[in-house]
Amino acid sequence: MWESALPTIRTAGVQEVVIRDGDVERLLDKLDPGQRVSLLTGADTWRTRPEPDVGLREIVFSDGPAGVRGPGWDERCTSALLPSPTALGALWDEDRVRRLGELLGDEARRKGVHVVLAPALNLHRSPLAGRHFECFSEDPLLAGRTGAALIRGIQSRGVAATAKHYVANDSETERLTLDVRLDERVLRELYLAPFEAAVQAGVWLVMSAYNKVNGVTMSESSLLREPLKGEWGFDGVIVSDWGGVRSTVASAVSAQDLAMPGPRGPWGEELLEALASGRVPAEAVEDKTRRLLRLASRVGALTPGGAPSDRVPAPDLAPAPNLEPPLPPGPGPGALRQELRAAAAAGFVLLENRGLLPLERGALDRVAVIGVHAGDPRVQGGGSSEVFPQHVVSPLDGLRDALGPGIRVAYEPGPAPEGGGGQAPLGARYGRDPEGGAPGVRLRVLDAVGTVLSTTHQPSGRVLEPELPPGARTVELAAVLHPDTSGPWTLGLGGFGALSLTVDGTAVLEGVFPPETEDPAVIHVRPPQHTARIPLTAGRTVHVVARRELASGTGRATVLTAAPPVPDPAEALAAAVAAAGSADVAVVVVGTTEGGESEGFDRASLRLPAPQDELVAAVTRANPRTVVVVNSGGPVELPWREAAGAVLLTWFPGQEAGHALADVLLGSAEPGGRLPTTWPATLDDAPVRTTQPTGGRLPYEEGLHIGHRAWLRTGAAGPAPAYWFGHGLGYTTWELERLGTPEPTRGGGYEVPVTLHNTGTRRGREVVQIHLSRPDSAIERPVSWLAGWVAAEAEPGERATAYVRIPARALQHWSEGAAGWTAEPGRFTVLAGRSAGDLPLRGAIDV
Ligand code: BGC
C-alpha cells in the first residue's frame, strides 16, 4: 500500500540521492529548538528557510496544477499550460495522466521548483463551485485514481506533489471561515477517499484547507492526525494553505507541520515561547522538523555532506543560490507540445453528434468560425493555478492551419459576452513602452518623494509580484496606447489602496479602495477592476499612466487593462448569422469569461454569459450543420443542445487548444473524454443548487448522494440530467454484449470481464464502467456507485474483452459503530455500461 517508506528520491535519469531515516535523525539532533521552530514557517511566499548547519537548502514551492508557474508571478517566466483538471478527470486514463504528471515534474525541475502544489482532490459537490475546473470529478474513485496517477508522474521526477485541500474545501463562498458539517461516513466514503488514494500513491505533501470541518479549522483539526498520519501512515509534510495557520498553540499541537507563507506568521517567536513554557510539547516540533528534513531529502534539498543539488533553475529565472548542476534534456518542445495537444483532444467530450462529425475535409469549401472565444479562448481557470503560457493556439488559428489555403475560413466574433471578456491587461496588442517603444508597458517603482528606485519593461499591465526595493512607496505602470478603433475605450485599474489613472496627464480615475477580504486569491491574483470610459480615435496615441500607493495589507498586485469599444451587438450577431448561413459548416465557440470560473468565489448561475445562447440559437437556425464548441471548465446550461449538429466540450484546453480542436473536428483524433461529473440541464435541476452557508455553516445535507448518486436516487420522480456521469461519444459505435463471471482477486477485490463489440466503421476507444448496487441493503446506500472502469480499444467489427478491476473497498462501507470498513454479507448487483445512466449489463457478486 504505502510505496515509499524510505526517503529516497527515485528520479528518471537524474542523480539519485539516498538519505536514510537514520541520517535524518542524526541531522535532527543537531538542530536546537530555535532552529527547528524557524524552519516551520516559510522564508517568503514560496520558499522555506535554509539551515546550513545540516546541509538543508531552501525548498522551493510553486502552484499547480495547470502548469508550474515557478516561485513567483513573472510574465517573463512562461510555463507549459495543461488542460484543466476537469479535462484530466474526463480522460479516464491513468497512463496519460501520469505522463502529464511527468511533464509537470520536468517543468518543476526546469524552474528550480521542489514542490508542486497539485493535485486538488476536492469533489464536484456543486456545479457552482468556483474551483470546479481545478478538481477532477464528482466521484471519489475517479478523483482518487486520477490524482494518484498525477502524483506518481510528478514524483517520478524527484519533485513533490501536494494533495490539496484537505478536506471538504468543495466551494469558495466564505472559504476562509466556512464550517462544513458532515458525518464521518460521508467524510470517509466521499471527501477523504481521494486523499487516501493519494497517500497510497506515496504523496509527499498534503495541504490543509482554509475551511473548518464540524467546527474546527483544518490547520487545527484532529483529522490531520487520524486518519491521515496515523491510520493511513502519511509520513510527509502537512503544509498549510497560504495563510491557513491562524493560531500558535492549537495548530502546533495538531498535526500541522509547516506554515506558509512567511516570513511572518503565528508560529515563529510565539511558538518558541509556547515550546519553552510547555504549552506545545517538544515532540510536536521535533516531528514537524523531522518531516521537513525528510521532504528535503526526498526532493534533493538536503545534502549534509555538501554534495551539490541536481536541480537547475530556469534560464529565465534569477538563479536560486542552491540549485546548480544541469538536468539532462527532457522531451524537446515538439514532443511536449504533441503531448499537450493529444491530451487535450483525448479529454474533449462529444455530447451530441447528429452525423456531422468528423468533418469530411473533401466536402468543405467554406467554413464559418464564430465566437469571441474562437479568437481568444479561455485556456485556464482563474486563481492561484494560473500560469503564463508559452503560447496559445486559438481555435481559429488551429482550424486555419489544419484546413489550409484551399478552404475559405470566415471569422465572425459575434456579440461580446457580457461580464468580463474584454478586460485584457494592456499588452503587446495596444500598448508600447514609453521608453524605447517595445510592446508592453513600463513599470517604475518610486519612493516617497518620487525618486525612481527601479524601472523595468513588462510584457503586459498585469504586474502581480514586482520587486520592491527598500523605500518603495508607489508602483507606476505607463504605456503609450495605440487605439485601432474609434469610440469609447474602457480603461481599467486593479489593485487595492490609493489608485490613480491619467490619460495624457488628465486624471480619469482616482480613489482609495481598501481590501474588503483577506482572501489571497483576490488580493494577490485578481484584484477588482475600476474602470473609466474614454473616447479615443483610431491611430491617435495617448499616454496612459496608472499609479498605486503601496500600503500594508494592500498586496503587491497592480493591473492595467484596456478594452476597445464593444461592437454593436445586433450588427455583430447579424454578421455571424450571415457567415454561418453561407458556409458548409459553422463552428461556434462559446464559453465562460474571466468574471466566471475562478478561485475566490462561486458562480451564481450556470448560464453562458449573455448573449451567447442567443448567438448559438441564431447560428444553428441559419445553418443546422453547426458544431457548438463549449469552452468552460465546468458545467454550463446548453439550452440549444437539441438543435445543434454537434456539441463538443473542450474544458479549459491549455495552450494547444486550437490544434487539438482541429484534430478532433477533422477526425485525426477521436474525442476521447467521458464526463467526470453529471451535467444538469439547468441549475434548478442540480442536486446542490447553492453553496451559500447559513451563519457560516454549510451542512452537506445530501450526505452520500452527490452527483450521479443524487440523480439516480430521485429517478423518474425528478428531472433527468442533461448528460450523465460517464457519458461521451466517440467516432465509432459500440455494443456492450456480455458481462462474464466476476473472478476474485488477491486483496479481496474482483475482476469483471465485459465483452464489447465495435459496431461502427473506425477504430475507437471505449470506457467500460462498472457500478455496484445493493437493493436489499440493511443500511442507507447510493442507488449505485462507480466501482471500477477500464478502457478498451477495437477495430471496426472487432470484439474486445475489458477486464475491469473492482477493489475490495468498493464492496465495503464505513461503519461508524465499528469505526472501520466493513462489507455487508449478501448479494451485490454488478452493472456494466457506458455512463451512470446507461448500465445495460448485469451480474452479481456474493459476499
Ligand atoms: C490556494 C491554494 C494555493 C495557494 C498558494 C491558496 O489561496 O487555495 O490552492 O496553492 O493559495 O498560491
Image (cartoon, helix red, strand yellow):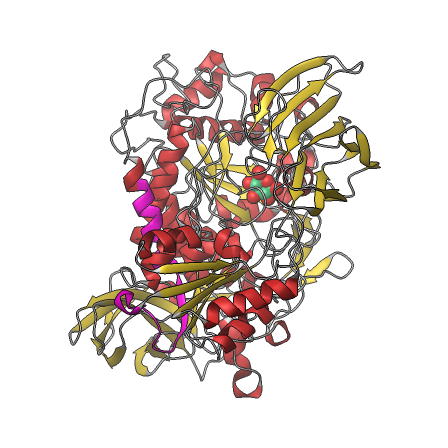
Q: Is residue 787 left or right of residue 564?
A: left
User: In front: 758, or 271?
Assistant: 758
Q: Is residue 751 left or right of residue 547?
A: left
Vertical relation: 240 (above or below) 423: above
Residue drawn where x is 49% and y is 21% of the image: 58
Vertical relation: 556 (above or below) 658: above
Residue 234 x %, y %: 45, 42
Q: Can you see residue 255?
A: no
Is residue 238 shown in magenta?
no
Residue drawn where x is 42% and y is 58% of the image: 89
Residue 744 x %, y %: 24, 69
The magenta span reads 336-363
**Displayed quadrant of residue 761:** bottom left
Is residue 359 shown in magenta?
yes
Q: Is residue 466 left or right of residue 19?
A: right
Residue 219 x %, y %: 62, 42
User: In front: 158, or 387?
Assistant: 387
The quadrant of the rendered image in which ligand 1 is seen is top right
User: In front: 439, or 465?
Assistant: 439
